[in-house]
Amino acid sequence: MDVCNVDFTLQVEAVVTKDELQHLTFLCKSEIDSIGRITAGIIRLLKLEGSVGQSVIDQLGNLGMFPKFLIH
């Protein structure tokens, strides 16, 4: 069996407005927040919260929360 390695690079440049960038940031934050809540829910369903601790569950539920100094 022959194995071939293929490398390629894709470079993309885009011009966006500040509003578009803020909207994209909001969407990313929302997705991260959702992933954390889903993970926390799965841990609860599997009854693993005792082994990982309540603080971990709380942190997963707040993944999308930005520290106040990062919000402009």
Image: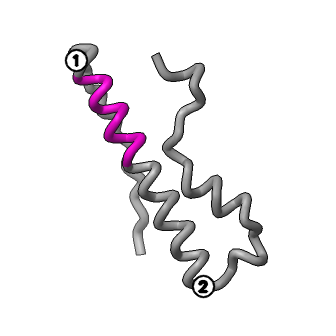
According to the picture, the residue beneath numbered tag 2 turns out to be: 46
Q: Nearer the viewer, residue 14 or 11?
A: 14
Q: Residue 44 colored magenta?
A: no
| Position above or below: 55 against 41 | above
Segment tinted magenta in the rendering: 20-30
Mark number for residue 48? none
Relative placement, left or right, of 31 versus 55 is: left
The residue positioned farthest toward the bottom in the image shown:
46
Residue plotted at (75% across, 70% down) = 52
Image x and y of residue 66, in percent: 54, 33
According to the picture, the residue beneath numbered tag 1 turns out to be: 16
Q: Secondary structure at mark 1?
A: loop
Q: Quadrant of residue 10?
A: top left
Image x and y of residue 34, in percent: 42, 56
Residue plotted at (78% across, 76% down) = 51
| Position above or below: 6 against 49 | above
Residue plotted at (42% across, 41% down) = 29
Of callouts 2 and 1, the N-terminal one? 1
Image x and y of residue 69, in percent: 59, 20
Going by the numbered disc 2, the residue's amino acid type is Leu
Q: Quadrant of residue 48?
A: bottom right
Going by the numbered disc 1, the residue's amino acid type is Val
Q: Quadrant of residue 47?
A: bottom right
Mark 2–mark 1 Cα distance, whole angstroms, equals 43 Å
